């Protein structure tokens, strides 16, 4: 932590403007959700791919249980890609609106909702923390205890290595490549790096409860409730 830092004033986006500072979250094009959804989507793709590769290496890809678990991840990848595309489109729309001096983007209430939220922001608040945590859990199941039982040092041992070459082979994969996959699974789920990455995904956009309360206070809540009251009034 640095307590004596000089930031050149010409590099400051906001300098002493409290109104601008307090309005940053509500009046911005949405570039943060774009980069966050791209990053999270690619991480989900990687975890799903690793879970698939390890399931095949362990001979578990033929079992309905693992086909269903990994198949769900692949479906969630497709959802994530839709969110990513929506975040890009939404960000461009907001940037164009801001260029016209409009700080709020609203729909016409007919072809789209009157109140528009930030789909990328909602995704990084709730969707991506859930799916990336789920993907890590599926990866743990696919890998099993092999991530703990074998090490590169064991393989390098002249007495142990040949035994691993004989007994550690999997369907269509030799012992060394299977061990590499297991160690990669450990790096993504059980190591200090993996544990930090998991915590990062859960709390990237802040306290989940505070985020949920903020969405409760959004105009979308009232718009959804109004549907019920309009139906009752008919």
Image: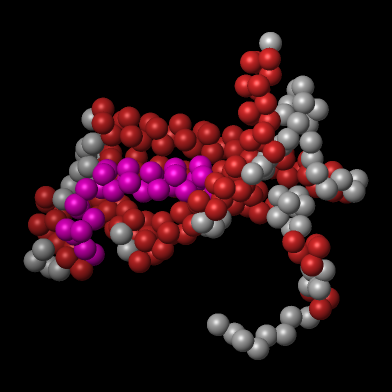
Percent x, y for residue 83?
Answer: 60, 38
Q: Quadrant of residue 232?
A: top right
User: Is there any visible trace of residue 120 in the rendered image?
Assistant: no
Percent x, y for residue 193?
Answer: 39, 64
**Residue drawn 57% across the image and 37% down it:** 81
Q: Quadrant of the C terminus?
A: top right
Q: Is residue 211 magenta?
A: no
Q: Is residue 180 left or right of residue 118?
A: left
What are the residue bounds of the magenta stretch? 124-152
For the residue pair 144 and 27, the one nearer the viewer reads as 27
Furthest residue in direction bottom, as rendered: 4
Q: Is residue 162 left or right of residue 129?
A: left
Percent x, y for residue 116?
Answer: 71, 37
**Residue drawn 47% across the image and 48% down it:** 129
Percent x, y for residue 212?
Answer: 55, 46
Q: Is residue 190 above or below residue 128?
A: below
For the residue pair 51 and 87, the one nearer the viewer reads as 87
* Chief SS of the magenta region: helix
**Residue drawn 37% across the image and 60% down it:** 194
**Residue drawn 56% across the image and 43% down it:** 123
Q: Is residue 91 left or right of residue 211?
A: right
User: Is there any visible trace of residue 215 in the rendered image?
Assistant: yes
For the residue pair 146 and 57, the one nearer the viewer reads as 146
The colour style of the image is secondary structure
């Amino acid at each position: 932590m640095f307590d004596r830092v000089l930031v050149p004033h010409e590099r400051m986006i906001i300098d002493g403007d409290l109104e601008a500072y307090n309005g940053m979250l509500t009046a911005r094009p949405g570039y943060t959700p774009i980069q966050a959804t791209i990053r999270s989507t690619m991480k989900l793709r990687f975890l799903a791919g690793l879970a698939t590769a390890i399931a095949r290496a362990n001979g578990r890809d033929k079992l309905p249980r693992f086909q269903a678990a990994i198949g769900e991840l692949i479906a969630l990848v497709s959802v994530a890609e839709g969110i990513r595309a929506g975040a890009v489109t939404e960000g461009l729309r907001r940037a164009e609106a801001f260029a016209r001096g409009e700080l709020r983007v609203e729909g016409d209430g007919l072809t789209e909702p009157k109140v528009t939220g930030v789909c990328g922001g909602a995704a990084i608040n709730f969707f991506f923390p859930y799916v990336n945590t789920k993907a890590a859990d599926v990866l743990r199941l696919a890998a099993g205890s092999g991530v703990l039982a074998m090490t590169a040092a064991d393989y390098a041992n002249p007495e142990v290595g040949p035994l691993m070459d004989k007994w550690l082979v999997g369907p269509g994969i030799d012992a060394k490549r299977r061990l590499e996959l297991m160690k990669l699974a450990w790096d993504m789920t059980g190591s200090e790096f993996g544990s930090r990455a998991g915590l990062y995904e859960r709390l990237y956009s802040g306290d989940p409860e505070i985020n949920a309360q903020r969405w409760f206070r959004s105009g979308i809540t009232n718009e959804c409730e109004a549907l019920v009251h309009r139906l009752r009034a008919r």
